[in-house]
Amino acid sequence: MTEYSTDETFLIEVGSEYVTASEPYVIKAMPVTFASKLNGIKKLVVGKGIVEIAENSFARCVSLREVELPDSLEIIGNAAFAHCSNLVKIAISHGVKKIGADAFKCCFRLTNVCIPGSALTIGANAFEDCINLRCISLLDGVEVIGQEAFKGCTNLSDFAIPDSITEIKKGAFEHCKCLENLAIPNGVTEISENAFYGCTGLKSIVIPESVSKICSYAFQGCVNLPAIVIPQSVTTISAEAFKDCKSLSHIEIPDGVTEISLGVFEGCAGLTSFEIPNGVTKIGMAAFYGCTALASITIPESVCEIWALAFTQCRSLTSITLPSHVVKIGEHAFEYCTALDSIIIPEGITCINEGTFKNCTALKAVVLPETLETIALKAFKACEALLSITIPKGVRRLKNSAFERCKSLAHVMLPQNTKCDRNVFKDCPNLHNIVRY
């Protein structure tokens, strides 16, 4: 018998017109019209001896509920069962070596699956948007979880990563909102980009000493992750890796890290204190933007650059000591640090950039360095508690609105040669004494 169908079952065997005529026996890529041939079929049986199901073979067979695969099967091709939106049951044979890209993508009713250790690689997007997939048994032997393999499996909760895994690719578990606890096996060397992005239920994760890099957006939006231990083996934490981890209250950065990257802790509203390790030379753009509970931070002498927006809206930060080697403070770096009451700008700084201390409403005292040459647009605008300021002799220019709306400002020491643009002291109602020296 080569092929038969009943009202509910369809069998494909060696000898069928849909199977190659000689070994290795492969179910051919089906025409687009094949899905209509299986209309109403609920069970598919793939016969013994067949070793491969070609790409798109049973894609969009929307009535299909159950698939029975033979032990001879080795390859499930790309999109072989993609968009089988009513597929509930499939047992992946223990001889399967490859699960192709998109193989089971958008199989919305699939609830559990066992992936044998013989399948060394799970292809990209293989189970993407299987929104009712709750349990995955991933057996030891699997080595690679492909790009976005389980992305959008929003109900996936029962899952363990076997020790055989060496690579978790980009976005592998993105938006797996029900994952709570995970341990990454020793052997994985990097947490890839977007790997756990938007895993809003994640409460704990163990990172092994084999990991040297945490890539961009790796844990972004893990809003219930309260703490994480980063091993000393990690030397790179890339942009926005922990952005919007709103519950994160404790994290320690390894000594080998040399840069706090762009937006890496942006929106971590639960972070109350932070120690930057000695060896870090740069605090990147928006690194701590919106860390509204951050009350204290230790910056080592190794830091020489603080980029734009680095501490914007750190509303609980009362004081900060800038290292003597800092030569750059970017635009809006401390804007809306509304609890900051004093600051000493180190020697070496030549420009207070646009909006650097704008809306620091509690700032009473500022010490400016002798190396300073320019105070830029709105640099201290709306520093409503600032009482007095001495502009160093090297400052050639105060730009527009530099001290606008400094409502408590009463005394200014201003060099004879310093040029003032428009509205530098606009809406400073208590300023009655500007002394040129």
Image (spheres, helix red, strand yellow):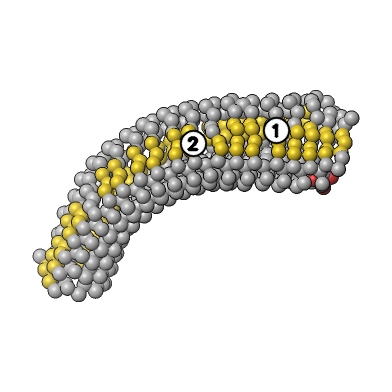
* Residue in view at x 70 percent, y 33 percent: 91
Give the residue type at disc 1: Ala
* Residue in view at x 44 percent, y 47 percent: 224
Q: Quadrant of residue 324?
A: top left
Residue lying furthest right: 1
Q: Quadrant of residue 38?
A: top right
- Which residue is disc 1 drawn over? 91
Along the viewing direction, whichever of 430 and 373 lies nearer the viewer: 430
Where is residue 403 drawn, in percent x and y?
A: 24, 67
Where is residue 432 drawn, in percent x and y?
A: 14, 74
Q: Is residue 436 left or right of residue 50?
A: left
The answer, for residue 151, to whether it is visible in the render is no
Q: Is residue 364 left or right of residue 251?
A: left
Secondary structure at badge 2 equals strand
In the depicted structure, whether residue 251 falls above or below residue 352: above
Disc number at residue 182?
2
Where is residue 287 drawn, in percent x and y?
A: 36, 49
Secondary structure at badge 1 equals strand
Along the viewing direction, whichever of 128 and 374 lies nearer the viewer: 128
Reading the chain from its start, which is encountered first: label 2 or label 1? 1
Q: Quadrant of residue 259?
A: top left
Q: Is residue 363 left or right of residue 230?
A: left
Give the residue type at disc 2: Leu
Where is residue 207 drawn, in percent x and y?
A: 44, 33
Q: Dot 1: few (<14), some (14–19), or many (≥20) neighbours within 10 Å? A: some
In the depicted structure, whether residue 389 falls above or below residue 29: below
Q: Quadrant of the N terminus?
A: top right
In the depicted structure, whether residue 173 falls above or below residue 92: below
